[in-house]
């Protein structure tokens, strides 16, 4: 009897001895590898996943060649499920549909008849309604499969065989691209132009050591079935092809339709790869409704067979290029297409390859296919030569052969003995039909024998000569190129994205003259038109004018407070001239204890900033423009120091005067240009601080206003010229008290 207690103890001991974590890891790894190799990643040699390979092979078995009639897609899917791929019918049909879509595949592998979906994102009709057959490209992929070009393996049920690979007389991996997600890895390969790939492959055959950079002379970049414009930098494309990882900027293609009276509109003719047109338009319409596209007034889809998306600008004053640049920034009219050349290499292992490696491994596969097809043909020639030799024996000894066949009990053995035939030859003679004897001609047999031997010698030479092998492959590539040369122009343009610095909101502002008024207490307003600056304007009781200047609605207004901080306001955003305006503190985030010391337009290249202690610096105007209401700190100050002067740098000399009435003149060039900081000492003061500072042209001379509001002009200022940081000298007689220039 069986001792169940002891048996149970043994099982428990076995389980206890097994490390659960390692067992789980081992099984998960097996699952992951199975998913990677048998489902998700394409093979570098034929560029296909197992489901696609099985689809094409099943269609060939059904004799669905390009010159044959279509068959129902359901028939194809049924055969694939029943014989090769035991998975769901929807997954197989979806894979088949994609192979037939000319907007998804650069070179479709299935010729579909019926509704196979469209670029709008509509699904294909059910498989019972559609029909399919192979394309010429598929024929190239399958060419030679009956000539022992590739290995076969048993199907999942062991009833038949399926190819491990296809012969792949077409660079399918790079030409059509591939996408897939495996366990812990993924692949994403954009499509390319086959003519460019062929040229690169031929160059690689001649120059095996060629670099990826050299190969880019042929392969300029991806070529998508939906066209578009590739605007990725050449250096970035090169890096992606060298490493097998990167991305490409792809934009929609558009044209500008112009009409009379300066009216124009944009027509999008090509959209980026893998973008559904209906979804794109839906997103554009939503963004327009939410006022996220301020430059557009309307969007319409006028597409028929070709893509035609109409974009109406809000203003004819806008530039079409700027409108499109704004759309590229915030919509799917510009996308990034990833490159992750992660495929199964020739060792059936996942590997990230460069462009050169991918092409080289495909060429190596083609060489292996060539050698296997050569050996297959040699074997066929050997068999035929053996048959022809037997036929010659029959022809020369026809009567004797007939007599042996009629009278001998074992004719095969008798023929082998009498004429030194092989068993195969004897069986061939015996299997001949009598009517075939009429076609036996000595000259014809000898001619066939000679031609076969000549072909045999050529094939033996091909087998032993590697250079001849590569010449043969190069010739096949030339034939492939000639087949596509007339109909396969590059669809995706290659260009450079324009560098345009713009603010969409600013572009929509109508240009109108303004007079900007800011009071002593910080109330600001903008009045229409360029009014007389000397006019008297109304202010609140106890308040008065501080800054008055002319500007336009398209200008940016710069405000410098006493702590060296800049703020930026668009002139179109200023309160209108009714009433007294609004406090600056409501428009910008400036503390109440801070006061503005300068208000000017951002229309010069440089600004000169000076503190009350006589320190100063030059700064680029573009650098002080603040993007937020909080402003931008430029001039660093001590606690007892304040920002005092901000002037556009429009002259070459500086005149500085202190409260001690010392005047110093020096070139502007002695003041360094920096982005931010304390600056350098412009004038030293033993007592007091800076009183005033101005800029003037060395050729015109220095001007100042006297206390009587008269203007004095000094042309000979040599005695006050000194080095920056000097103390200066007393000004000429008549210089105002307190010291100032205006």
Image (cartoon, helix red, strand yellow):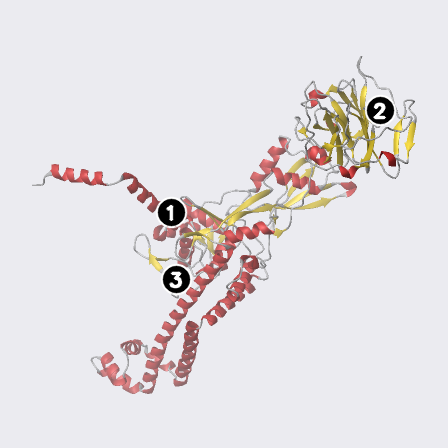
Q: Earlier in the sequence, mark 3 or mark 1?
A: 1
| Looking at the image, residue 674 lies above or below residue 575 | below
Instruction: Look at mark 2 in the image and give the residue it sits on.
Output: 739
Label annotation for residue 224? none
Q: Position of residue 79 (x, y in %)?
A: 37, 52
Q: Position of residue 14 (x, y in %)?
A: 20, 41
Q: Position of residue 512 (x, y in %)?
A: 79, 31
Q: Is 698 left or right of 6, judged from the image as shown?
A: right
Q: Residue at x 42, y 48 (%)?
A: 40
Q: Earlier in the sequence, mark 3 or mark 2?
A: 3
Q: Is residue 265 visible?
A: no
SS category of the residue bearing label 1 = helix
Q: Is residue 251 visible?
A: yes
Front tag of 3 and 1: 1
Identify which residue, 279 or 645, lies in the foreground.
645
SS category of the residue bearing label 3 = loop
Identify which residue, 18 or 572, lies in the foreground.
18
SS category of the residue bearing label 2 = loop
Q: CA distance from mark 2 to mark 1?
A: 86 Å
Q: CA distance from mark 3 to mark 1?
A: 23 Å
Q: In which quadrant will I find the N terminus?
A: top left
Front tag of 2 and 1: 2
Which quadrant of the view contains residue 88? Answer: top left
Q: Earlier in the sequence, mark 2 or mark 1?
A: 1
Q: Position of residue 173 (x, y in %)?
A: 48, 55
Instruction: Look at mark 1 in the image and give the residue it sits on.
Output: 35
């Amino acid at each position: 009897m069986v001792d169940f207690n002891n048996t149970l103890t043994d099982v428990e001991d076995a389980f206890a001895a097994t490390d659960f974590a390692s067992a789980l890891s081992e099984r998960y790894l097996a699952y992951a590898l199975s998913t990677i190799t048998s489902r998700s990643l394409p093979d570098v040699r034929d560029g296909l996943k197992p489901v696609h390979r099985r689809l094409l092979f099943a269609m060939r078995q059904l004799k669905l060649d390009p010159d044959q009639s279509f068959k129902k897609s359901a028939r194809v899917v049924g055969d694939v499920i029943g014989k090769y791929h035991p998975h769901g019918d929807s997954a197989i049909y979806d894979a088949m549909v994609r192979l037939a879509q000319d907007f998804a595949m650069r070179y479709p592998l299935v010729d579909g008849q019926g509704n196979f979906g469209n670029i709008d994102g509509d699904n294909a009709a059910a498989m019972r309604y559609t029909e399919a057959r192979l394309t010429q490209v598929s024929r190239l992929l399958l060419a030679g499969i009956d000539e022992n070009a590739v290995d076969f393996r048993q199907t999942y049920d062991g009833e038949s065989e399926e190819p491990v690979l296809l012969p792949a007389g077409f660079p399918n991996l790079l030409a059509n691209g591939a996408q897939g997600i495996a366990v812990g890895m993924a692949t994403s390969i954009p499509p390319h132009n086959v003519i460019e790939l062929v040229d690169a492959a031929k160059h690689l055959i001649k120059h095996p050591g060629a670099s990826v950079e050299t190969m880019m002379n042929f392969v300029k970049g991806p070529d998508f079935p939906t066209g578009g414009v590739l605007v990725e930098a050449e250096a970035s494309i090169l890096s992606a092809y060298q490493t097998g990882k990167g991305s490409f900027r792809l934009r929609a293609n558009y044209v500008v339709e112009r009409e009379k009276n300066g009216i124009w509109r944009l027509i999008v003719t090509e959209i980026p790869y893998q973008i559904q047109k209906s979804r794109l338009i839906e997103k554009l319409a939503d963004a327009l409704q939410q006022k996220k596209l301020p430059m557009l007034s309307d969007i319409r889809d006028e597409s028929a067979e070709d893509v035609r998306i109409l974009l109406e600008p809000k203003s004819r004053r806008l530039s079409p290029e700027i409108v499109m640049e704004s759309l590229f920034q915030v919509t799917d009219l510009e996308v990034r297409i990833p490159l992750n050349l992660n495929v199964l290499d020739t060792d059936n292992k996942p590997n990230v390859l460069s462009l050169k490696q991918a092409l080289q491994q495909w060429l190596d596969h083609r060489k292996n296919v060539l050698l296997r097809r050569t050996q297959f043909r040699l074997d066929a020639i050997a068999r035929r030569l053996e048959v022809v030799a037997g036929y010659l024996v029959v022809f020369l000894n026809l009567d004797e052969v007939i007599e042996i066949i009629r009278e001998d009990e074992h004719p095969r053995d008798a023929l082998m003995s009498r004429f030194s035939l092989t068993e195969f030859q004897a069986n061939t003679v015996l299997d001949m039909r009598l009517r075939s004897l009429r076609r036996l001609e000595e000259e014809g047999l000898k001619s066939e024998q000679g031609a076969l031997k000549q072909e045999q010698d050529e094939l033996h030479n091909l087998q032993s000569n590697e250079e001849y092998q590569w010449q043969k492959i190069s010739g096949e590539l030339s034939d492939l190129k000639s087949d596509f040369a007339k109909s396969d122009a590059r669809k995706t343009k290659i260009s450079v994205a324009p560098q345009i610095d713009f603010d969409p909101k600013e572009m929509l502002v109508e240009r109108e003259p303004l007079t900007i008024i800011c009071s002593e207490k910080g109330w600001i307003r903008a009045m229409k038109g360029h009014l007389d600056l000397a006019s008297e304007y109304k202010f609140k009781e106890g308040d008065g004018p501080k800054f008055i200047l002319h500007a336009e609605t398209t200008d940016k207004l710069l405000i410098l407070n006493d702590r060296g901080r800049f703020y930026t306001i668009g002139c179109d955003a200023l309160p209108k001239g009714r009433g007294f305006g609004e406090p600056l503190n409501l428009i910008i985030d400036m503390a109440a204890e801070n006061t503005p010391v300068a208000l000017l337009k951002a229309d010069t290249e440089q600004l000169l900033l000076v503190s009350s202690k006589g320190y100063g610096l030059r700064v680029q105007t573009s650098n002080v423009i603040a993007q937020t209401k909080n402003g931008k700190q430029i001039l660093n100050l001590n606690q007892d120091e304040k920002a005092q002067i901000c002037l556009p740098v429009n002259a070459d000399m500086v005149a500085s005067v202190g409260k001690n009435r010392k005047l110093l003149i020096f070139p502007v060039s002695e003041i360094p240009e920096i982005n931010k900081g304390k600056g350098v000492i412009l004038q030293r003061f033993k007592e007091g601080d800076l009183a005033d500072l101005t800029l003037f042209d060395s050729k015109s001379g220095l001007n100042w206003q006297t206390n009587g509001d008269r203007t004095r002009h000094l042309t000979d200022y040599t005695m006050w010229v000194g080095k920056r940081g000097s103390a200066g000298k007393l000004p000429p007689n008549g210089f105002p008290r307190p010291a100032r220039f205006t």
